[in-house]
Image (cartoon, helix red, strand yellow):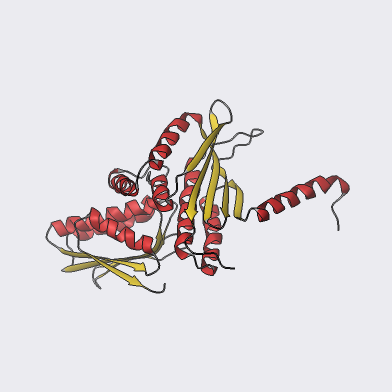
Amino acid sequence: MTYSGNNSGFINYIYDRYRDLTIRDICLVFEGRITHQVMKALTGLMEEQMEEMKEKRTLRRVYHVMVESLQNINRHAETFENDGYPYPGRGVVLVTRDEGHYRITTGNIIETSNVEEISLFLGRLNNMDPAGLDELYMRQMRDGVISAKGGAGLGFIDVRRKTAHPLDYDFIQVDKDTSFFIFTATISRQESWKH
Amino acid sequence: MEALRIEPTDDSPLVVLDRENNLFEISGKSLPENVVQFYRPVTEWLTAYQKDPGPETVFTFKLIYFNTASSKMILDILMLLEEMAEAGHEVTVRWMSLTSDEDMQEAGKEYEEMVDLPFEHHTYEFE
């Protein structure tokens, strides 16, 4: 069975995506609603790789950053109206690797009114030293409360202190009320990856 | 008092709180969707136990993973144990980590800094 002629564009599109993914050494890509079950499935895929690889510490951190980033989307991503269909908790997730690093990238819609606060907070985390981050984490753990959304306000702080690289982040304004938030955490690989 | 036992799942730990057999343990993975709901029976049990604890309470944490929301709940548990110690009861925390898991070992040391309780740090090779 072959695709009919009017689908050849679609086949090329899929092939181009496939080629892009393999060339860039993308371990995992997902777009859709990030429910708790999806978070567990995606992190489970990384865990399976952890079993086979020797970089235990690196992969534990990749796993942890994925859990925290996906739970952020699950809890905080806003509705993106598209043809009138709401998509709560929707986002895109990419895990890539090269010789020296793993990168976990997420993208999701947030309210434009939250852009400044997130941007200032992440900027502040990037400027802190390890001791300052530990202190902030412990203080937030002691004084913070679990929000109605289930977060403890600790995710970004812990991702920053476990990755030892500045956090990359940017915002693209979608319309007056909503913006697309893109976030990348970079983790150095401590041992070489073996096939 | 009645023992509390919560069976582990793929996102929540095994919990055993058993005054009669002197067993106090949380082990496995902790990243439940709703941490407050999951840990409520644990903190409620400990609040009741505080009033009439056994002669020596050794509380074991043997976690292979916990998310940041769970880290807050673990601190809440440790603070309940700290209150018991302040009231003059014998309480020890046994923090167990995989030998290969330096982050888990670090987390134990961080908690030790945060509460006034004696900690024993142990490592083990296999899950």
Residue A55 placement (x, y as % from top left): 49, 65
Residue B29 appears in the figure: yes
Q: Quadrant of the C terminus of chain A?
A: bottom right
Q: Residue at x 37, y 63 (%)?
A: B102
Measured along the vertical axis of the image, is residue B111 above or below residue A155? Answer: below
* Image-based side of B26 in relation to B112, left or right: right
Pick out the residue farthest to the top.
A176
Q: Residue at x 18, y 69 (%)?
A: B56
Q: Quadrant of the N terminus of chain A?
A: bottom right
Measured along the vertical axis of the image, is residue A13 above or below residue A55? Answer: above
* Number of marks: 0
* Image-based side of A76 in relation to B124, left or right: right
Residue B24 quadrant: bottom left
Q: In the image shown, does B19 or B84 lie closer to the viewer? A: B84
Residue B20 quadrant: bottom left
Measured along the vertical axis of the image, is residue B38 above or below residue A87? Answer: below
Pick out the residue farthest to the right.
A5
Q: In the image shown, does B56 or A180 lie closer to the viewer? A: A180
Residue B18 placement (x, y as % from top left): 27, 68
Measured along the vertical axis of the image, is residue A32 above or below residue B62? Answer: above
Residue B37 appears in the figure: no
* Image-based side of A106 in relation to A4, left or right: left
Q: Residue at x 51, y 43 (%)?
A: A183
Q: In the image shown, does A4 or B5 lie closer to the viewer? A: A4
Q: In the image shown, does B81 or A125 lie closer to the viewer? A: A125
Residue B84 placement (x, y as % from top left): 17, 58
